[in-house]
Image (cartoon, grey):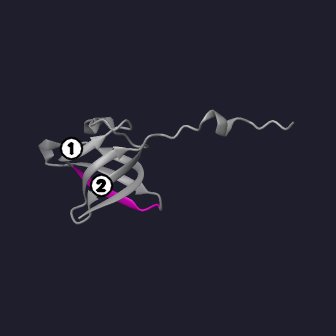
Amino acid sequence: MSKTLTGTLDSVTAADAAKNIPAKVMVTDETGLKYLLTVKDTTTIYNDKSEAVSFDHIAAGQKVRVKYDGAKNEAVSIRVVPKVVPSAASVAPSVAP
């Protein structure tokens, strides 16, 4: 059964096929819990524009939403969450009459 978490990528470790080591990501959720998840060849990865990208397009520090198999600790999909840019209206100083 898939679960979903939103958090920040703490680390992104590429696979080492010669040593039979799979790719992994460490994600810290919004409550501070850390999740170490295996990234398989079947894991789908999306950038902040919802375009499918390869593993090397994600990096530590990015906010992500991850669907994962809790029983296997395997990422099913990783989606970079778009950065929210405040609108000019919300950051403009108010002027008293």
Q: Which range is magenta?
A: 32-39
Q: Secondary structure at mark 2?
A: strand
The residue under label 1 is 15
Q: Amino acid at mark 1?
A: Ala
Residue 76: image x %, image y %? 24, 52
Task: Check if mark 1's residue and mark 2's residue have beta carbons within 8 Å.
Answer: no
In front of the other: 17 or 58: 58
Residue 67: image x %, image y %? 30, 55
**Mark 1 neighbour class, 10 Å CA radius: few under 14, some 14 to 19, many 20 or more:** some
**Mark 2 neighbour class, 10 Å CA radius: few under 14, some 14 to 19, many 20 or more:** many
Q: Is residue 88 above or below residue 28?
A: above
Identity of the residue drawn at 13% across and 48% down: 20
Q: Quadrant of residue 59?
A: top left
Residue 4: image x %, image y %? 34, 58
In front of the other: 89 or 7: 89
Identity of the residue drawn at 48% across and 40% down: 83
Q: Is residue 23 left or right of residue 4?
A: left
Q: CA distance from mark 1 to mark 2?
A: 20 Å
The residue under label 2 is 67
- Quadrant the C terminus occupies: top right
